[in-house]
Amino acid sequence: MFEARFQSFEDSGERAATAARVAALRAELERRGLSGFIVPRADRYQNEYLPPSEERLSWLTGFTGSAGAAIVLADRAAIFVDGRYLLQVRDQVDTEVFAIEHLVDAPPESWLEANLTAGAKLGYDPWLHTVDGASKLAKACTAVDASLVPTEPNPIDALWSDRPAPLLGPVTLHDLRYAGEDAAAKLDRVRTEIAKLKADALVVCNPQDVAWAFNIRGADVAHTPLPLACAIVPQDGRPALYIDGRKLTNTVRHALEQHADVRDPGEFARDLAALGGAKRTVRLDQGSAADALAKIVKEAGGKVVSGVDPIALMRAVKNETEIAGARAAHVRDGAAVVRFLAWFDREAPRGALTEIDAVAALESFRRDTGKLKDISFPTIAGAGPNGAVVHYRVTRRTNRVIAPGELFLIDSGGQYEDGTTDITRTVALGEPSAEARARFTRVLKGHIAIATMVFPDGTTGAQIDSFARQFLWAAGVDFDHGTGHGVGSYLSVHEGPASISKRGATALKRGMILSNEPGYYQAGAYGIRIENLVLVAEAPPVAGGEKPLNRFETLTLAPIDRRLIDLELLTRDEIRWLDDYHARVDATLDPLLNADTRTWLAAATQPL
Amino acid sequence: MFEARFQSFEDSGERAATAARVAALRAELERRGLSGFIVPRADRYQNEYLPPSEERLSWLTGFTGSAGAAIVLADRAAIFVDGRYLLQVRDQVDTEVFAIEHLVDAPPESWLEANLTAGAKLGYDPWLHTVDGASKLAKACTAVDASLVPTEPNPIDALWSDRPAPLLGPVTLHDLRYAGEDAAAKLDRVRTEIAKLKADALVVCNPQDVAWAFNIRGADVAHTPLPLACAIVPQDGRPALYIDGRKLTNTVRHALEQHADVRDPGEFARDLAALGGAKRTVRLDQGSAADALAKIVKEAGGKVVSGVDPIALMRAVKNETEIAGARAAHVRDGAAVVRFLAWFDREAPRGALTEIDAVAALESFRRDTGKLKDISFPTIAGAGPNGAVVHYRVTRRTNRVIAPGELFLIDSGGQYEDGTTDITRTVALGEPSAEARARFTRVLKGHIAIATMVFPDGTTGAQIDSFARQFLWAAGVDFDHGTGHGVGSYLSVHEGPASISKRGATALKRGMILSNEPGYYQAGAYGIRIENLVLVAEAPPVAGGEKPLNRFETLTLAPIDRRLIDLELLTRDEIRWLDDYHARVDATLDPLLNADTRTWLAAATQPL
């Protein structure tokens, strides 16, 4: 009945072949005199979003998660994934070949210290590791008298016979009515930052930064309108933008040439070396720039100054136009989600709906808005035990009928030109267990704690992350992911530098958009997550207050399943928050819906 | 009437002489061909607690705070202090000579980058900077084409004519009935850690570690029973303990020689070089070991492996004997504090009590226990505006009469052989303002939030710090210090590695003792702090819980001033916590008090 056009349900894992591939890699390494090789999930842009031609980790191991790494030594191999993927990895990866390690608790560095022998030579591709990442690996190697050896070309590329061609997604201009600030003004602000940083030039190697600074969007990776491109912005003079000319129409090229020299990506390394040769001081972010870039500048005699990416912070703070766009996108997206939830409540009790049906229906409702450019990531739709797989992606093989008595978790988003959305709802089919309701309510309490927080200017995400967990902690449980990530403006649905997590060291600034998504996952049983996007906004001043205060404004508009709430566990203030939120959802979306859906929404948003 | 024996009230600043000293230093630097010199507040042991002979920063600048640094160049000089000392530094330091900089916001590295010229040679004493500290300085120098030059002997020592002789505080054995584990067993555990770290030897340069591992205490610095000493513990074989033999009685020497070779401190560098010469792998903590130590090992051909100090973590986790000792010390100390608070309530309303009177009285009540070895730090006793100076130390010059209508903040502690205490109470004299009561109540709410927290094993102090601040944030205020620090067992009142603060990256483990001390300070008006020590303990398991949970057990026993509480702001649970706490204080201390004080305590601990 519904069709998903932006998402496929095929299994991409090819478990059978990995042992042979690992064997081929070992032979290749031996030929090159290497004891081992490390394969991160990364491309030269150090971006979460990879084109298929860069999925070396998946090719080698079968693992398709969004973060991870593998190390292959002559007699052993390991794959490293984080808590989100511990179930998935066992499903996809041949555990006879790869030991499974926790990326955070037992990272590659520790494994190398324990498994490398003295004199070993570990190869790495300096284009696929950040400066910081390579330096950690080098330290681990040195600690056991082994060495880390830059290895080009990448040995996987020599073996990967059916490697897809790089995508050449057309570049489009991101209109000023969505961007709110033209490229000239943005580049002026960037130059001011470069001057403050006392650098001669800034290396911009994050395509999100390129997209933001030049007001362009691309189509090189799935679901995120990234143009794979990089740039060098000098303190004085014209920036150089390195992008494959085949992606540009004459109009786009002309627009870009107003602000920059448009150059071939093949000239990037040469131009960097020239800067180095001219003894220039080049600023790059050691946490996101490829190790190769720093090496090129230094080896040519230039000076590299490391430090956080100044554009990332500028990009994270949305301007008034982007904020207005986000609000509009969330109203539109909320209406589509409400249509979906109403449809689900009508259809699911018949007992035949599958996860794939739900994904297709939700995408259809979003497409009906007439403004959907893409979904913002493959929808996560997990019924019962599949809901406990944090980054579950349904395939025809794993597809489940959503059965009565089960929870159904659906995490999805849309790419609209005025804004990117990301929302998770967990709904009950039939009568949920008392335990599931208690857990859902504790997740909700954490969500409300974040939604209602007031905090001084300068507070970081790390300082507030635990407020989302406190009620779960009191029940002896927790969730193994951050509480929230930054979200781009018609850009990446996962955007740095700010996050609400243990590692969120960036101050939350007014204009940032982040997710608020605590959860709870019981392996083999069910998953719960409640996710809204929130905007960091000024809080009303308090009499006698001494510090500028911020708060979150919730942008996402869709009901939270009242059937899953254990009222006994909520305080009066929490009930008031939910009732107010539901009243706003109903008042805002009602005019956009037909009579049936309107009736459904009125019931779903009644006061508790 | 009362006398303080452990604390003096003299001003130690000698503002007049510093210009001449700086001039003499400049001449000395010129003789040595240096462009400048950096003077940290540190000795070779990189310890907060310095003997007078190591107070070079104070000699040069007049500044007597517990943290800071100065840099003297030919034409300019600056002193760096943190937020706690911004008022004090202006009082003590000649601002014609030294520019005042914020140690955290504008650290020496940034100042060097802005003020050093290319080719400049900045001297530093490698014994007085940690490996990490020296590396930051070197990086700043390199960034402006200047260099960082190890400078021995320290040029200040050549000029400091009336430098006090090093203290030779007698070393005592820390009895097994307080330590709970003998030195042999501790050293075995240390050796196991060294083996795990794959090192041949561990350099122990923190005197707290030496005191803990060898079960000794000393008298080389004020208030903290530290023996200034260091050690080398090999993975196999006998440790070497470097300590001035004049501090040892025959009995102590004999006891130490059971476990270690007792050697002269002069041999430490030579023995380290010998380890290096034998190509050994030496582990040291780059965050606390002097830069000179790493240099000696490396220059001799050895390998240095950096990493966190393994003894610090072992020391922070108190054993059953130390925990029982802490409980006993807190009962004893609580009774002394209650006698003080009762006396204060009786005497202060007459309008003649001064801060110094209060300090002397409190010390006397502690001495009356018959067990007080020392106070654990100079008592902070601030009436009215003096209470807002976070690390205030009263002198005859600043001493104030505690006036009706004022708040009085008193932060103090005792060193007992069975435990170290640290407690702050804020009390009202006369009728407090509504604002002061509201602020006090918000501080109390934060204190209770920490005291009642339940958190999974592995949670760090950084993850819970903000729970102490949330109610202040909601009122637009905050406090500019951590919520809590680790506390030693008859050792340093400030002890690493755990803390409850933004920077508290160490997991809170069962057996750790920390302070819980949120506050609020209104410059020029009043200060509030409520501090109890808490023990990390196992929390009762929860049905359906999946993770081992911890909680805090409050050790400190003394009433919290009920007159400062705005009941409207407390929840029922918070009121119950305070009533339960007060009931426990009353029941525990009542038997130790005379009739008058008992009556006072019963009133002070009545339910709200």
Image: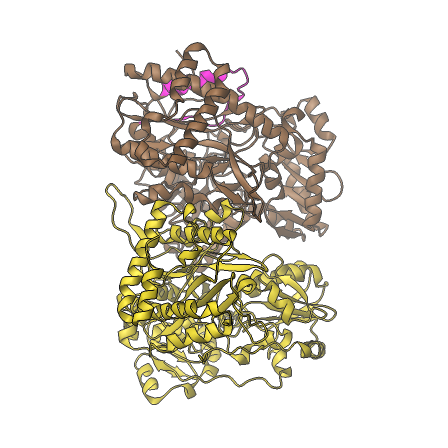
Chain colours: A brown, B yellow
**Depth check: A448 or A107 in front?**
A448
Q: What residue is at 64 percent from the left and 73 percent from the top?
A: B61
Q: Quadrant of the C terminus of chain A?
A: top left
The image shows residue A40 at horizontal and vertical percentages of: 46, 42
Q: Residue furthest front?
A: B350
The image shows residue B199 at horizontal and vertical percentages of: 39, 66
Q: Residue furthest left?
A: B543
Q: Is residue B87 above or below residue B26?
A: above
Quarter occupied by residue B78 = bottom right
The image shows residue A598 at horizontal and vertical percentages of: 43, 14
Q: Is residue B85 above or below residue A141?
A: below
- Horizontal side of residue B456 vs A212, given as left or right: left
Specify whether residue A456 is painted magenta: no
Specify whether residue A364 is painted magenta: yes
**Depth check: A192 or B393 in front?**
B393
Q: What residue is at 37 percent from the left and 78 percent from the top?
A: B367
Is residue B128 visible in the rendered image? The answer is: yes
Q: Residue furthest right?
A: A237
Q: Is residue B80 above or below residue B448?
A: below
**Depth check: A272 or A101 in front?**
A101
Quarter occupied by residue A219 = top right
Count of residue discs: 0
Q: Quadrant of the N terminus of chain A?
A: top left
Q: Which residues are magenta?
A: A356-383
Q: Is residue B280 above or below residue A233?
A: below
The image shows residue B214 at horizontal and vertical percentages of: 34, 76
Q: What residue is at 70 percent from the left and 22 percent from the top?
A: A250
Is residue A109 visible in the rendered image? The answer is: no
- Horizontal side of residue B600 vs A173, given as left or right: left
